[in-house]
Amino acid sequence: MPLALAGFASRVVRWQRSHGRSELPWQNTRDPYRVWLSEVMLQQTQVSTVLGYFDRFLERFPTVADLAAAHEDEVLGLWSGLGYYSRARNMHRCAQEVVSRFGGRFPPTAAQLETLPGIGRSTSAAIASFCFGERVAILDGNVKRVLTRFLGFDADLASAANERTLWDLATQLLPPEGDEADMPAYTQGVMDLGATICTPRKPTCLLCPVAADCKAKALGEQERFPVKTRKLRRSSASIWMLVARDTAGRVWLEKRPAKGIWAGLYCLPCFDSRETLVAGMPALPDEADLHDAPAFLHVLTHKDLHLHPVLWSAKKNAQASAQGAWFASEAWPGLGLPAPVRKLLSEPPGA
């Protein structure tokens, strides 16, 4: 291996110990439960958003056994607002398997960790590296950016074969065999470089410990890396939501199917059109009892949702749809609710 590549890990380790992040609550710990929880929460979510959720989860579920014993509705309720709810469901299943298969202790190797629900190759490596000192590479979005720029790796990462090649290169750049004590600092360091120095736009190369040998910097084309051509197409959908309140101020909610948008969450009844909304109500209301609130846009990662709230003041003992139940306002905070539904309930249209 060229000298520049051989020294990559040592420079990252030294930089991390002097300048890397150390103030986050899931850092400076070898507790795999805390590291795992943070890794799941940080997937496609900013640190500033995760901080409050991380503290609340630890307060309610201080151990993996506490999380495993919880009801899924409570887990989703506490997760509500973080998005990508499959993460929460997989997290709950993972906790249950840690308890049932491993006696409540996370296994110490990346290979074993990767057999658990919701733990992929990079997450398993992060836990194994941080908590058990295993010599194994991670390759999350930040690290891909650091490594492809440093190596000048311009192969298209939309190709699985090219990504496997990058995994191999990432493994070659790890601290040498016998230096496993450096693995937590190295793993944190490459993550920190991507998050704070080697940013997607206008990277701060003057502060980078490996800039002298960075191929992308030498080319003056840092923002060209990483290369990934395939992009998911954005789509859109229109959804009519029935906001039904009874005389006691309760709101009608029903649980979404196990698959699809907002899977497993409690939600206002949703329909493809206003006509199907009316037809889906067991007690057909007088049209004068239905009021259309202003539509609004809710943006998901690859989909725009145009939401149309329809308000209905229901009489006592009425049903708003074929399934569901009335929920008082005291119950809403503990339910897993999609963000736009929580907004509609906390800020009623026309209030």
Image (cartoon, grey):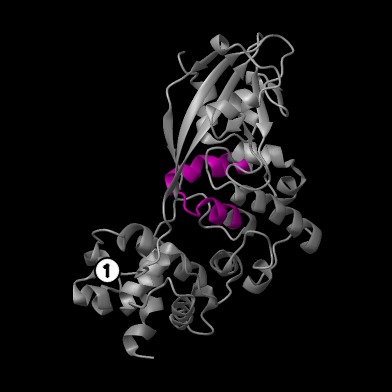
Q: Residues within 10 Å of mark 1 (few under 14, many from 20)?
A: some
The total of numbered circles placed on residues is 1
Range shown magenta: 36-57
User: Which residue appears at 80% of the width and 58% of the height?
Assistant: 100
Vertical order, 172 against 303 (above or below): below
Secondary structure mostly seen in the magenta stretch: helix
- Which quadrant of the figure contains the N terminus? bottom left
Residue 40 in the magenta stretch? The answer is: yes
In the structure shown, which secondary structural element does the residue marked by tag 1 occupy? helix
Mark 1 is on which residue type? Answer: Arg
Measured from the top left, where is residue 301 in percent x and y? 45, 49
**Residue identifier under label 1:** 224
Q: Position of residue 126 (x, y in %)?
A: 54, 66
User: 202 and 348: which one is in front?
Assistant: 348
Establish if 164 lies above or below 294: below
Magenta-colored stretch includes residue 268: no
Q: Residue at x 45, y 81 (%)?
A: 165
State the residue at coordinates (61%, 69%).
132
Instruction: List x then y, in percent, for residue 145.
Output: 36, 67
Q: Does residue 271 sit above or below 21 in this rendering? A: above
Q: Quadrant of residue 328?
A: top right
Q: Where's residue 90, x and y in %?
A: 66, 53
Which residue is at the front of the view, 47 or 184?
Answer: 47
Extreme bottom residue here?
1
Residue depicted at 45% across the width and 46% down the height: 303
